[in-house]
Image (spheres, rainbow, N blue to C red):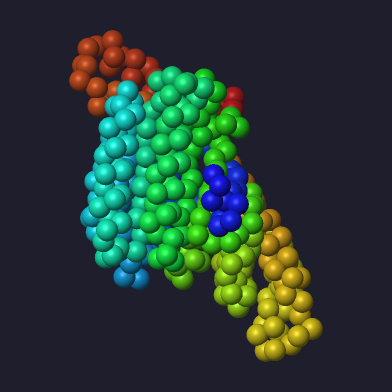
């Protein structure tokens, strides 16, 4: 996109597994790494009680409008000023499912009673599911999305708004998603409306970056980090404050980089007192380095799944599917009991 040459940046985002919609929306809004159990919640679409940027924004009087994948409406019910959901289960529809989002965009851009607009398009995902990422339908759909982004940018460029574009997950080469391949766990992050530099991010970083731009508190369970490259347009005092705030929050959860955090904080407080001997570039560099290390440490511990938890989650997932089925024949019930005995067998877990 030519807009990136003058007014934005393009970064790479690492997505943790499972690469399915609900856990990824939770990562994008809470700054945490959802657990394997969230695969079950993806089937049930239960309301999220975890602190998120959505909750923080509403607590601070921000008005949010939403259009797109109705998973958002099930996670965050009765929280949006206006909304309309589209279902992700009719994968053969990759046209109307997007048109139903876009027609609301132009209506909302004519209003000025909202602060945040969230759009979750499904068409590209649906094409990937039914025909794979190399389908001839992909390029026209990408061009459609590109044109919509450009039109939104053109209509809002004088309103001091920021546009963020990313994906909840990628797509494997054979189509579909849910695993850990490179193409499933890498998505772009585009920022338009502010000068910035490219960076490599974790998905858990995104809500903190948004919070910083909007002056909101970080979600309480977040393990993400802010990026000084992405936030390079901020005033120096605000950037340093945000880096220090982020560092202190993560330092309460991680044991790495303690000495450097103390050093960076001391230099930051000296800077606030007017001590010119504190090199700003060194302060930023120390914070950046430690934030990256703490984020990596916390992410590693979050994705180190307990084998029993994964097994029981798999069992609950299968049970959920079976119980939701209208079939009641004896063979199905027998298979369910056999599976239950197998998955909970002590011999299995001893072998693991």
Q: Is residue 108 left or right of residue 173?
A: left
Q: Is residue 7 left or right of residue 138?
A: right
Q: Position of residue 91 (x, y in %)?
A: 33, 26
Residue at image x 59%, y 24%?
351
Residue at image x 55%, y 57%?
7
Res. 204 visible in picture: yes
- The quadrant in which the C terminus is found is top right
Q: Position of residue 239 (x, y in %)?
A: 60, 71
Q: Position of residue 183 (x, y in %)?
A: 57, 31
Quick one: which residue is furthest to the right in this view? 277
- The quadrant in which the N terminus is found is top right
Q: Quadrant of residue 290?
A: bottom right
Q: Position of residue 95 (x, y in %)?
A: 31, 30
Residue at image x 35%, y 71%?
60
Q: Quadrant of residue 267?
A: bottom right
Residue at image x 26%, y 65%?
113
Residue 31 in the image: above or below residue 351: below
Quick one: which residue is furthest to the top in this view? 331
Q: Is residue 64 left or right of residue 206?
A: left
The residue closer to the viewer here, 322 or 39, is 39
**Number of marks:** 0
Q: Is residue 246 left or right of residue 109?
A: right
Residue 31 in the image: above or below residue 138: below
Res. 227 visible in picture: no
Q: Quadrant of residue 125?
A: top left
Residue 281 in the image: above or below residue 183: below
């Amino acid at each position: 996109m030519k807009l990136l040459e003058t007014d934005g940046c393009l970064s790479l985002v690492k997505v943790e597994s499972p690469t399915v919609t609900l856990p990824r929306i939770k990562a994008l809004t809470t700054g945490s790494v959802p657990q394997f159990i969230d695969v079950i919640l993806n089937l049930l679409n239960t309301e999220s009680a975890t602190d998120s940027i959505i909750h923080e924004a509403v607590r601070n009087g921000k008005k949010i409008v939403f259009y797109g994948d109705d998973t958002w409406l099930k996670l965050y019910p009765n929280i949006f000023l206006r909304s309309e959901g589209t279902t992700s289960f009719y994968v053969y529809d990759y046209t109307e499912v997007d048109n139903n989002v876009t027609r609301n965009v132009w209506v909302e851009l004519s209003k000025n009673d909202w602060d945040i607009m969230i759009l979750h398009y499904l068409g590209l995902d649906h094409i990937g599911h039914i025909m794979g990422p190399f389908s001839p339908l992909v390029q026209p759909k990408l061009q459609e999305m590109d044109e919509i982004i450009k039109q939104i940018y053109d209509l809002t460029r004088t309103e001091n708004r920021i546009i963020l574009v990313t994906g909840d997950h990628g797509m494997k080469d054979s189509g579909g998603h849910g695993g850990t391949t490179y193409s499933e766990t890498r998505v772009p992050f585009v920022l338009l409306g502010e000068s910035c530099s490219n960076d490599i991010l974790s998905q858990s970083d995104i809500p903190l970056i948004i919070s910083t731009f909007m002056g909101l508190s970080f979600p309480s369970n977040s393990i993400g980090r802010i990026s000084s490259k992405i936030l390079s347009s901020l005033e120096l005092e605000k950037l340093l404050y945000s880096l220090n705030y982020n560092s202190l929050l993560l330092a309460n959860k991680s044991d790495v980089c303690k000495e450097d955090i103390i050093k960076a904080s001391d230099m930051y407080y000296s800077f606030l007192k007017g001590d010119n001997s504190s090199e700003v570039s060194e302060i930023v560099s120390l914070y950046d380095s430690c934030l990256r290390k703490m984020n990596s440490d916390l992410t590693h511990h979050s994705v180190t799944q307990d084998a029993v938890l994964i097994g029981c989650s798999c069992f609950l997932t299968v049970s959920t599917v079976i119980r939701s089925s209208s079939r009641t024949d004896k063979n199905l019930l027998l298979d369910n009991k056999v599976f239950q005995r197998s998955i909970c067998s002590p011999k299995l877990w001893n072998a693991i």
